Amino acid sequence: MAGLGGIGGFGGLGGMNSQAQQQQEQMRLMEMMQEMQVADSLRMYNELVQRCFGHCVENFRSRKLDGKEEACIVRCCQKFLKFTQRATQRFQEHQQEMAEEAAKAQQNK
């Protein structure tokens, strides 16, 4: 019987090992999410630059933007950021609605 008690002890260690594995997996997932967020931020920034530069800069006579180009870029960036924030907000609202519907469906089972 003492030998079986020892085996039970290993089961406890296995549980701790499993917990450590779960923590490592969570860390990997967090790292992946951070990488995805950085990539998404860079993509959004590049899209913003390409869109506003292409729309607002008309010529390359000078190293600096003229007043008209600068004002256009400011308006373009503000509009792009407001749109992005609104789209993100709507996406989050939609995700929350879907989660609530899934929870209700789970409760009705």
Image (cartoon, grey):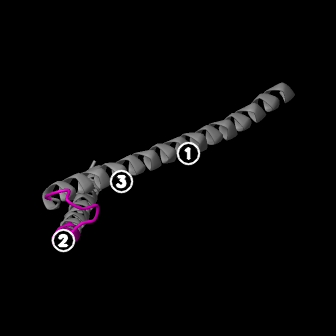
Q: Position of residue 56 (x, y in %)?
A: 15, 61
Per the image, the residue denoted by label 1 is: 27
Badge 2 element? helix
Badge 1 element? helix
Other residues around mark 1 within 10 Å, as few (<14) / some (14–19) / many (≥20): few
- Can residue 11 be seen here? The reply is yes
**Magenta-colored stretch includes residue 62:** yes
Which quadrant holds residue 8? top right
In the rendered structure, are the residues bearing label 3 and label 1 in contact, judged by CB atoms less than 8 Å apart?
no
Q: Between 4 and 80, which is closer to the camera in this rendering?
A: 80
Q: Label 2 vs label 3: CA separation?
A: 20 Å
Q: Label 3 vs label 1: CA separation?
A: 21 Å
As drawn, 4 above or below 39: above
Other residues around mark 3 within 10 Å, as few (<14) / some (14–19) / many (≥20): few
Q: Earlier in the sequence, mark 1 or mark 2?
A: 1
Task: Report the mark closest to the observer, 3 or 1.
Answer: 3
Q: Earlier in the sequence, mark 2 or mark 3?
A: 3
Q: Which residues are magenta?
A: 58-74
Other residues around mark 2 within 10 Å, as few (<14) / some (14–19) / many (≥20): some
Per the image, the residue denoted by label 3 is: 41
User: For the point 65% across and 41% down, which residue is it?
Assistant: 20
Q: Between 92 and 54, which is closer to the camera in this rendering?
A: 54
**Magenta-colored stretch includes residue 38:** no
Q: Between 92 and 9, which is closer to the camera in this rendering?
A: 92
Q: Earlier in the sequence, mark 3 or mark 1?
A: 1
Per the image, the residue denoted by label 2 is: 75
Query: On the picture, is 55 further left or further right than 26?
Result: left
